[in-house]
Image (cartoon, rainbow, N blue to C red):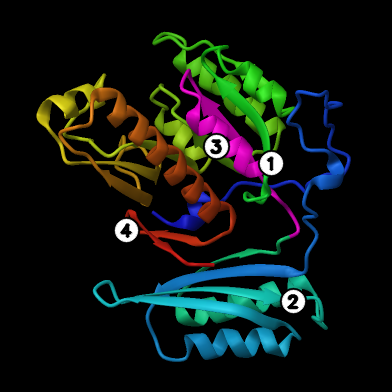
Amino acid sequence: VSIFSLLAVPTKAFSSNSKFPPPDDMSLAVPPSEAKDPSKNNAILRVHGPDANGIVAAFSQLLYGHGNGIVDSEQHTDHTAKLFFQRIHFDYSKMHTDKISLEHGIKEVCERFEMKWDLNWGDQRKKVCVMVSKYDHCLWELLLRHRAGELDCEIALVISNHPDLQNIADSFGIPFHVFKVTKDTKKDVEAQELTLMKEHGIDLVVLARYMQIITDDFCAAYPVINIHHSFLPAFIGGKPYHRAHERGVKLIGATAHYATADLDEGPIIEQDITRISHRDEVNDLIRKGRLLEKSVLVTAVKAHIEDRIIVYNNKCVIFDG
């Protein structure tokens, strides 16, 4: 699996004319004046391929030759797979050529070293669709962190199979759409959802405790990040925290990963754990688990929208950024 196939989704420039509802005293909508300006002359280049001598020098010389300055660079070598990974953050404000010329140069270097590459010019915010059911903790965390400026993206819409959380989306001025899902209508409903996402120019789908299994076609259409408790596969099915309490577990956790055709087996982006003692009741496990879930999910989404992830062999390289 390549990160570049996961990310091969068209994007649209963020519009400064995006419509925000007039906030009332209870509204948490972000006024346009507080929205972060996406126009910045900083780009992110990610490359990966067979390890070889001269890769770092080749890209450094290429960027310098076009008048760019490297802000920071991170690299990693998987010695077992003999693969090299690099993320370069560079400033192109003084570039004396043009974007097409630089992209052509990057392509030539990558062809020479048999590498794959992805370049984000940083002039377009990624548009995110959040999918939810009835649990609200992950949705709240995403929207509050976004409002605080911690997630440099546009949360364009929220989709749910229940109407319960509409008031949350409304308070942030984000469109909320309900699609009832049954076993017989799943395929048709997903087609409607994908059409809506395409209309909004969505780049990333986040399953914020969306309690429906998505199809392979859905996974192929967009990069999808899912969050779940880390009991899988030990406590699959309903009421996992109750079953974990009965078993007397000493650790609980949460895992955020890319959703693929293999259910809950996609590349892992982020995980965390917390200790459990004999004093903890079921409600304590649930509370601690939800704290982990929302924190882990935000960390994973942040890594994705900041282009800090390269996926290979069903696992992720996560750069610090």
Label 1 neighbour load within 10 Å: few <14, some 14-19, many 20+: some
SS at mark 4?
A: loop
- Residue placed at 87% from the left, 26% from the top? 22
SS at mark 3?
A: helix
Which residue carries the number 1 mark? Answer: 147
- Disc 1 vs disc 4: which is toward the camera? 1
Q: Is residue 101 visible?
A: yes
First along the sequence among labels 1 and 2:
2
The label number, if any, that marks residue 313 in the structure image? 4
- Residue placed at 18% from the left, 38% from the top? 277
Q: Between marks 3 and 2, how big is the CA–CA gap? A: 41 Å
First along the sequence among labels 3 and 2:
2
Q: Toward the viewer: 210 or 142? A: 142
Q: Amino acid at mark 3?
A: Glu
Which residue carries the number 3 mark? Answer: 141
Q: Quadrant of residue 233?
A: top left
Q: Quadrant of residue 168?
A: top right
Q: Is residue 166 left or right of residue 24?
A: left
First along the sequence among labels 3 and 4:
3
Q: Between marks 4 and 2, how big is the CA–CA gap? A: 32 Å
Instruction: Give the magenta range.
Output: 123-147
Q: Position of residue 130 (x, y in %)?
A: 57, 32
Which residue carries the number 2 mark? Answer: 101
